[in-house]
Image (cartoon, grey):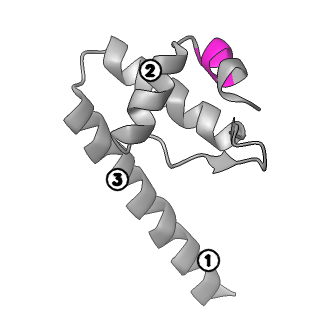
């Protein structure tokens, strides 16, 4: 999906999406040959998480830490599944 659809579906503005990308809260978007950013469902889930966390009063640095912990936990789970196979 393009940035406008992502913004609309997540309930934030386009400039907010760009800001979160610059700040590292969202991964750098893939680009189409035309230069448009393209996003997928995982980007939408991540953006919704950031929006909900902000609504709960978390700061952007705190949200960045939560996302890092979540990524580290997911990587650990994947490593455990690989070694069990």
Q: Is residue 7 magenta?
A: yes
Q: Which mark, residue 68?
A: 3
**In this rendering, which labeled residue sits more in front, label 3 or label 1?**
3
- Image quarter (top left, top right, bottom left or bottom right) of the N terminus: top right
Apparent side of residue 13 relative to residue 19 in the rendered image (left or right): right
Mark sitting earlier along the chain (3/2):
2
Report the magenta stretch's main SS.
helix
According to the picture, the residue beneath numbered tag 1 turns out to be 81
Say which residue appears at 31% left-offset and 15% top-offset.
56
Q: CA distance from mark 3 to mark 1?
A: 20 Å
Q: From what the image shows, is residue 73 above or below residue 40?
A: below
Q: CA distance from mark 2 to mark 1?
A: 36 Å
Binning the other alpha carbons within 10 Å of mark 3 as few (below 14), some (14 to 19) or many (20 upward) gives few
Mark sitting earlier along the chain (2/1):
2
Mark sitting earlier along the chain (3/1):
3
- CB contact under 8 Å: marks 3 and 1: no
Q: Residue furthest front?
A: 34
Apparent side of residue 17 relative to residue 29 in the rendered image (left or right): left
Q: Is residue 41 visible?
A: yes
Identify the image quadrant of residue 82: bottom right
Which of the pair 68/18 is nearer the observer?
Answer: 18
Where is residue 27 shown, x and y percent of the image? 50, 48
Query: Start and end of the magenta stretch?
Result: 6-10
> Which secondary structure lies at badge 2?
helix
- Image quarter (top left, top right, bottom left or bottom right) of the C terminus: bottom right
Q: Is residue 14 magenta?
A: no
> Which secondary structure lies at badge 3?
helix
Which of the pair 70/9 is nearer the observer?
Answer: 9
**In this rendering, which labeled residue sits more in front, label 2 or label 1?**
2
């Amino acid at each position: 999906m393009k940035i406008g659809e992502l913004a609309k579906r997540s309930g934030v503005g386009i400039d907010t999406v760009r800001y979160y990308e610059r700040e590292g809260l969202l991964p750098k978007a893939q680009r189409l040959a035309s230069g448009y950013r393209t996003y997928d469902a995982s980007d939408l889930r991540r953006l919704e998480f950031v929006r909900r966390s902000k609504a709960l009063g978390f700061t952007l640095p705190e949200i960045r830490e939560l996302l890092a912990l979540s990524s580290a936990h997911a990587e650990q789970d994947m490593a455990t599944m690989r070694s069990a196979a």
